[in-house]
Amino acid sequence: MKHFLTLADFTKDQILEMIDLAIKIKEQTKSSDLVPYMQNKTLGMIFEKSSTRTRVSFEVGIYQLGGVGLFLSSNDLQIGRGEPIKDTARVISSMVDMVMIRTYEQEKLEEFATFSKVPVVNGLTDSYHPVQLMTDYLTMIEFGKDKDPVVAYVGDGNNMAHSWLMLASKLGFELRVATPKGYECDSKIVSQALEFAKSSGSKITLCNDPKEAVTGADVVTTDTWVSMGQEDEKEKRVKDFEGYIVDKSLISLAKDNVIFLHCLPAYRGYEVSEEVFDEYADVIFTEAENRLHAQKGIMVWLDNKRGEFEQN
Ligand code: CP
Ligand code: NVA
């Protein structure tokens, strides 16, 4: 069974196949609302954290593919009252064709996948947000930033930074990550990315200086300083991240035709200034809409490959 848990599990060709499918389906969706690649298929969507984009894009996405999505909040599932993950996985996967999960620990997602009879998609964990990165790459293609780009990520060494490390090191482009001291990326994930980079040719730089990262970049990106589950640390984090805001003076160091990406939700005045956000709003909201298209590519790819991976 092939799951979509982290980009580390995919080859460059597989990632690009999913992106190509997303582009094709996005084009087809323009002329017809329904592109029934997953006619009558069901997607269970388990949420242990809040969501706007992930929920709406998966639910509308599966509907437009001819299937139906079930929104399953952990507050309402027995999982919230202590039913083991493995039992929940066995039960839900005996009734649906695919499962998307947004949860805390990556290990929890992996445990679910181990006991699932159907493909499982990572809708965000504390470690990774891979569906967002597929979306971000689709957006880079649409804005002409996929040919040997230099990408600068400024901010927390979190699930988004980790996923950028995976995407860059798999596809072979240059990535510079600037985090404050104490908020660096997970060292195991960095080592894995550096290993992938050896064969893909990707150049990965990790530093604590936003200016070093952004100078000459084609794409600048950031993420919230306070991820879901870290709300109690907000005061400390806001102090520790001083100087890491992507504002006009920082982004002016990038190439003239730079684009700015943000996975959203954005906190203006913290990780990004109001001015920068407004200037790149067109890119940011295209990126948000692209969640719908990128995830259709992922779901259809996993569904098509199901038989193939089951035989392996
Ligand atoms: N970017 C993203 O995953 O948004 P949501 O938290 O609203 O799903
Ligand atoms: N790093 C953020 C991403 C939100 C889409 C979080 O985990 O809350």
Image (cartoon, grey):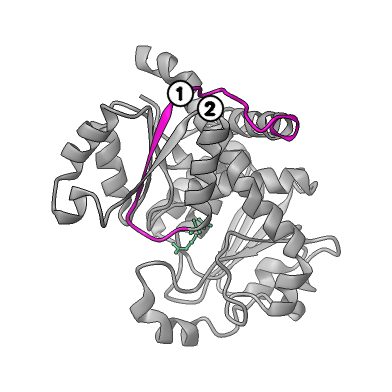
Of the two numbered discs 1 and 2 on the same chain, state the one appearing first in sequence: 1
Q: Position of residue 56 (x, y in %)?
A: 52, 49
Q: Which one is in front, 121 or 61?
A: 61
**Mark 1 to mark 2 CA distance (whole Å):** 6 Å
Q: Residue at x 34, y 27 (%)?
A: 118
What residue did someone put label 2 on?
66
> In the visual, does 214 lie left or right of 87?
right
User: Is 288 placed above or below 195 here?
Assistant: below
Q: Residue at x 28, y 48 (%)?
A: 107
> In the visual, does 257 lie left or right of 83?
right
Looking at the rendered image, the quarter that the C terminus falls into is top left
Quarter where residue 281 is shown: bottom right
What residue did someone put label 1 on?
40
Q: Position of residue 260 (x, y in %)?
A: 71, 63
Q: Which one is in front, 236 or 268?
A: 268
Q: Which one is in front, 186 or 127?
A: 127
Q: Are marks 1 and 2 in contact (CB under 8 Å)?
A: yes
- Tell me, yes or no, if residue 304 can be seen here: yes
Q: Give the prevailing secondary structure in the magenta stretch.
A: loop
Secondary structure beneath dot 2 equals loop
User: Is 104 placed above or below 42 here?
Assistant: below
Q: What amino acid is labelled 2 in the image?
A: Gly
Q: Identify the magenta region.
A: 29-51
Residue furthest out toward the right = 256
Looking at the rendered image, the quarter that the N terminus falls into is top left
